[in-house]
Image (cartoon, rainbow, N blue to C red):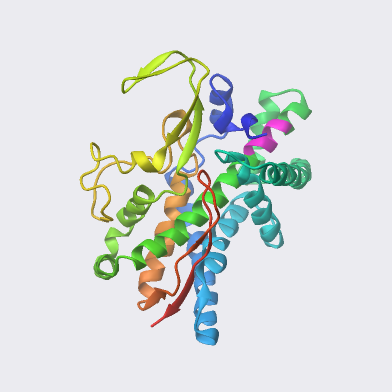
Amino acid sequence: MLSQTLQGLNPPLHTLQRRSLGNIFDTSTLESLRGPVSRIADTLLDRLAEQLRTTKEADFATMVGEEMPAATISHWLRLPHSDHDLLKSLTHGQAYAQELLPSKSQLAQANEAAGGLREYFTPVIRERRKALGNDVLSDWIRVWDEIEPDRAVADETLYHLVMFIVIASLETTSTLLSNMVWLLDQHPGTLAWLRSHPEQVPQAVEEVLRYDPPIHLTTRVATEDTVLSGFRISRDEVVHVMLAAANHDPDHHTDPDTFDITRAGSHLGFGGGIHYCIGAALARLEATVLLESLIRRFPTLRVTTPPVWEPRVAFRRLTALHVTER
């Protein structure tokens, strides 16, 4: 099913669908989202603080890491808060379809989740069309109703666009947020320096994305015969790109295995080319807002046990990160 979404398409169809979304996270949009994202972060951190006061320990991954992207994307698409748990569950299941060697049970889970996402978003699009508003999904419906005269085809395209954006936004950003806390906890000197240099927060987010990105692997199919670094690749051959390894390439990064939040330069944490993550700017905003609040409000926050990871390579998922205040 994901072969029909943006990440599985090539031009000219990819170009058409990508342009139909517009510049979804331009400067003005991000500024309009900063307030809501800040309020979401404050609400979640209030709950985290209360949990820490009550039980002395909390799971940051479930209380904040997974909740913040769900609340943000729901606000942006005007989806009910009551649907957060359902959307998280469905996207977690569907992400198995991205794995390098998914098992039969994982593929079955992914297919079931894909069906659930279709069942969820089909009526959402239908009902939104009946009462178009001043929101991004209404804008996309207007665009596709002009592009495609066949309503069924337009709705199918809209479904794939929205499904892909939701999956990518929830899975990758939640991992980024929790992994950010874990990596900084493992580098206490760096964290202490960051507390006194909060202006460096955006660069700290970039270093988390470089050092241990949410997506370690992506798959491509060669469109023509080529030679890459001395290796011959034939047309239609499947190529697995290890983004995390590229981010540790010593030819591109000085001392690449050192976590250095003052590091300058680019990385492949959001991929590259025409398939560069369209939600990168939103993920950066969420991570920056959250980290700014964390270092201000929780000066003694510490991780109590190593994180628990879902056994994935592509769309990685950090399922538990227990923290306390010392």
Residue 155 in the image: state x and y as whole percent: 73, 33
**Residue at point 43% right, 33% down?**
241
> Where 243 sits versus 211, above or below?
above
Q: Quadrant of the N terminus?
A: top right
Queried whether the magenta region covers residue 79, the answer comes back as no
Farthest-out residue, top: 225
**Residue at point 26% right, 71% down?**
192
The chief SS type of the magenta part is helix
State left or right for residue 42 relative to residue 301.
Answer: right
Farthest-out residue, left: 254
Q: How many marks?
A: 0
Along the line of sight, which residue is nearer the eye, 222 or 25? 222
Residue 255 in the image: state x and y as whole percent: 21, 48
**Quarter-wise, where is residue 150 in the image?**
top right
Residue 20 seen anywhere in this rendered image of the structure: no
Residue 160 in the image: state x and y as whole percent: 66, 36
Segment tinted magenta in the rendering: 156-161
State left or right for residue 285 relative to residue 67.
Answer: left
Along the line of sight, which residue is nearer the eye, 78 or 229? 229
Along the line of sight, which residue is nearer the eye, 116 or 75? 116
State left or right for residue 323 relative to residue 197.
Answer: right
Residue 276 seen anywhere in this rendered image of the structure: yes
> Where 11 sits versus 259, above or below?
above
**Residue at point 32% right, 57% down?**
204
Residue 162 in the image: state x and y as whole percent: 64, 41
